Image (cartoon, grey):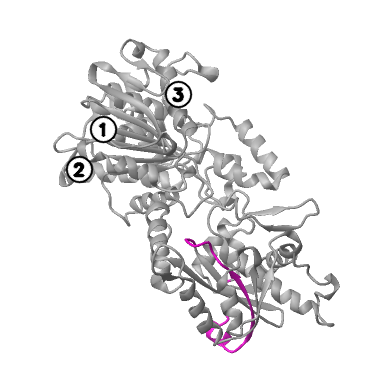
Amino acid sequence: MNNNMSTLTKAEQYAEDVRAKRILTCELVQLAVRRYYKDLQDALDKGWYFDRKAAMRAIKFIETLKHTKGEWAGQRFVLEPWQHFILWNIFGWKNADGTRRFRYVYVEIARKNGKTALSAGIGLYMLFADGEARPEVYSAATVKDQAKICFSDAVEIVKNTDLKNYLDTYRNSIVYEMKGGMMKPLSSDYGTHDGLNPSCGIIDEFHAHKDSGMFDVIKSAFGARRQSLMFIITTAGFNKNGACYAYRENVIKILRGINKDDTLFGIIYTLDSKEEWDNPKMWIKSNPNLGVSVSVDYLADQVTDAKNRPEAVRNVMTKNVNLWVDAEKTWILDDAWMRCVGETDPESLKGCTCWGGLDLSNVSDITAFVLIFHEADRFQLLPFFWIPEEKMLEKIKKENINYDLWVKAGYVKVTPGNVVDYDFVKADILLIIEEYDLQSTAYDRWNSSQTIIDLQNEGMECNPFGQGYGSMGAPTKEFEKLVLTEKIEHFGNPVLRWMLASTVVKTDPAGNIKPDKEKSVQKIDGIVASIMALGEWMTKQAEEDNNPYNERGMLSLE
């Protein structure tokens, strides 16, 4: 052991222990530590310096605060080494002019590791002790109740410490009258956010945000401050197409040296593979507070329950071991879907017999048309998508969905304006079906339009397809079976993959299943159209005498 270890701070000791692998951590934590040491080497060339006193000042301030609930209520905060390391980096690194280097912080960690208390502590430091003129601190979330979690913790901390002599607490604000400062909860349902001048924005549980709206509101108001701080802390989630996952991906690229952003500090406590989720020896990777605020017995109970109830597995993976997985009740996992990429040349399908599924969108959303081909015991899916240009731009901006890349690659076509140009879509469909032997197309009769009439007038056979269990149940189950047995090919279409990852199914008392558009995280129109196309094929096959679906009888179309 290094003889100088006794002189190291807890943060420095933690970094040494991670680097020397005396502590079991995941690759992403190791990369964060490696970046810290590299930055120390490069500081002079980069125009940075490390202010140990500033770092310790923030740490010591937070350790004067007191817990307000649970078994430690009334006791002072005792920050763990990993927390020291985070604060050490946030408040220690300085630019040449003395301002903080890091203006954005992303911390991802499993539940029950003290993240809300840490957030509240940082918020109070930024309000009371950072030295900013007229500080404004916001605890941000998409809804009021979530925004108040961190804020309410901060209120209780003030009431139970000497801070109450300096700070006044109210229902929706903590006021530092002497410095003209305040801390408030902020959410999208609080009304207008004009006039913000934040010195600090805290986003708790970023994974729950459907878009980057709150992040953008705070960031756009940062311009008037020289060293404002955005502190994001979250557990893993289910929406891999949302703002949080996109931000996470950027953090990982920075840690790997692929992307460059010297203003962003990121650290992610997770497992190195999904196979580790039920291994007690690995849990410390995503739970650095293991044995402190979260116990091995608690995690063991959660894992045991999940093994007895498969529907609970995803929740345990995201919340207890911090693994990003598919939607909470995702129907088919991505791994199974990607095994169905297949080797058939899509060009070889031209001229072949097929059946269609058409899911017409409402006026401002994506429209899906899917052809299904069948030969021997295998199926192929060929999807086509359309979206209004203005809706596409909105989705890119607010939800970080890759529509621009999909359009460029030819997976989605853009119609002009802010609503679907059905004439445009109709013309495209007629051109598409000229290249294939289309037998018939199923469509949602509850969302039919003049477009269907026009297509029928052009000679295209279109049949209404009910969206209840009677019609959707059998083809949904068959679709699932085809995927799990790898008897359906989709050619790796990224839009269809994105939609499947968001697809949630609901079940009736008889065990029938069908896609649930209301509970699905994102648009699933391509999957619904695929199932309808399969249902159309099954219905036609049921009319024949010698087919495997004859025993099922005719599908009912409500």
Image spot of residue 431 (x, y percent):
50, 84
Q: What residue is at 42 percent from the left and 39 percent from the top?
A: 188
Q: Nearer the viewer, mark 2 or mark 1?
A: 1
The residue singled out by tag 2 in the image is 43
Cα separation between marks 2 and 3 = 38 Å
Could you say whether the residue bearing mark 2 is in a helix, strand or loop? helix
Q: What residue is at 38 percent from the left and 25 percent from the top?
A: 121
Dot 3: few (<14), some (14–19), or many (≥20) neighbours within 10 Å?
many
On the question of residue 31 being in view, the answer is: yes
Q: Is residue 545 left or right of residue 59?
A: right
Q: Nearer the viewer, residue 205 or 340?
A: 205
Placement of 175 over or under 305, stated as above or below: above
Cα separation between marks 1 and 3 = 28 Å
Q: Nearer the viewer, mark 2 or mark 3?
A: 3
- Return the mark for residue 92: 1
For badge 3, the amino acid type reads Ser
Say whether disc 1 or disc 3 marks the residue closer to the N-terminus.
1
Membership of 343 in magenta stretch: yes
Say whether disc 2 or disc 3 marks the residue closer to the N-terminus.
2
For badge 1, the amino acid type reads Gly
Could you say whether the residue bearing mark 1 is in a helix, strand or loop? helix
The residue singled out by tag 3 in the image is 152
On the question of residue 77 being in view, the answer is: no
For badge 2, the amino acid type reads Ala
Image spot of residue 285 (x, y percent):
50, 41
- Return the mark for residue 227: none
Q: Which residues are magenta?
A: 341-365
